[in-house]
Image: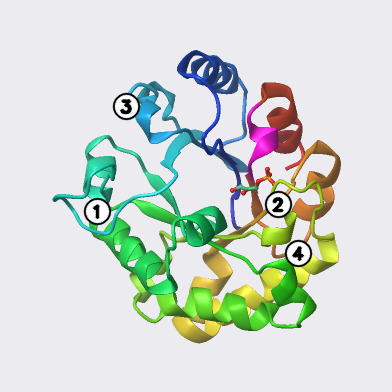
Amino acid sequence: MRKKIVAGNWKMNLTFDEGRQLLNELRLLRLDDDKVEVIVAPPSLYLSQFSFTNSNTLSLAAQNCHDKPSGAYTGEQSAAMLASLKIGYCILGHSERRSMFHESDEWVADKVMACFAEGVSPILCCGETLAEREAGRHFDVITKQLTTVFKRMDKKQAAYMIIAYEPVWAIGTGVTASSDQAQEMHAFIRSLISTELGREEAEEMRILYGGSVKGSNAKELFDQSDVDGGLVGGASLDFSSFKDIIDAI
Ligand code: 13P
């Protein structure tokens, strides 16, 4: 059985003290190690100070990294640097980075490969815009975003990969994909993994849903057979709203 994940993407939010307090509260949760893993992605500036967080049930993720191990890339951080801090996960290809920072599918694939090389697990995001969904192109968009990466991977790497399906129209809008829409896309993604990487790999890979997840809709989403947890933005910034989502597992 796939262990569920609830991941919080803080994006560019919370001061250092606010973040530390939130992590201290999360650390006190008694979570069932067999059932759930909580991952928190604070701003990278805080990662080294927050490494006290890492435990069996609570881990840290970065929100992005560069594809090169080192060099003249002002303002960037490499997967090697994350590994040197024992940061186990890195969110890659978030739609905000694709749209605002012009990250192409190929560049995201380079970053994924850089993470694998350093033993950092990528949380690879994919998602279509509202216009793409309305034009009936959502399956094509997801296929391109994911196969660009899958084509470069081997079966062993698949064991370290996590996918997050985040429809752009549901991010920060308060509009969540219905559980049927989420399940339909997650099942599609799983079949894509099966074709590109293998059936067993598809069975084992966790596929998270992201986009306006909150306590009130989390259970219905997480109960879908191909939804293995959530990637949460706004509702991960406050202890009680994030806990409500974790409790929905
Ligand atoms: P919201 O939960 O705020 O919609 O954000 C989702 C997201 O982008 C997580 O990466």
Q: Mark 2 vs ligand 1: CB under 8 Å?
A: yes
Q: Amino acid at mark 3?
A: Ser
Q: CA distance from mark 2 to mark 3?
A: 28 Å
The residue lying at 73 percent from left, 59 percent from top is 169
Marks 1/3: CA–CA distance: 17 Å
Residue at point 29%, 37% (across, down)? 86
> What whole-number distance in Å separates the C-alpha atoms at marks 4 and 2?
10 Å
In screen coordinates, is 63 left or right of 95? left
Q: Residue at x 52, y 86 (%)?
A: 195
- Quadrant occupied by the N terminus: bottom right
Residue 13 lies in quadrant? top right
Disc 1: which residue: 118
For the residues labelled 4 and 2, say whether their Cβ atoms are less than 8 Å apart: no
Name the front one of labels 2 and 1.
2
Give how far across and how far down residue 248 sits, in percent.
Answer: 77, 40
Front position among marks 1 and 3: 3
Label 2 sits on residue:
211
Q: What's under tag 2, amino acid-wise?
A: Gly
Q: Earlier in the sequence, mark 1 or mark 3?
A: 3
**Which of marks 2 and 4 precedes in the sequence?**
4
Count neighbours of disc 1 (C-alpha within 10 A) and say few if under 14, some if 14 to 19, many if 20 or more: some
Q: Which residues are magenta?
A: 232-237
Q: Point out which mark residue 182 bears.
A: 4
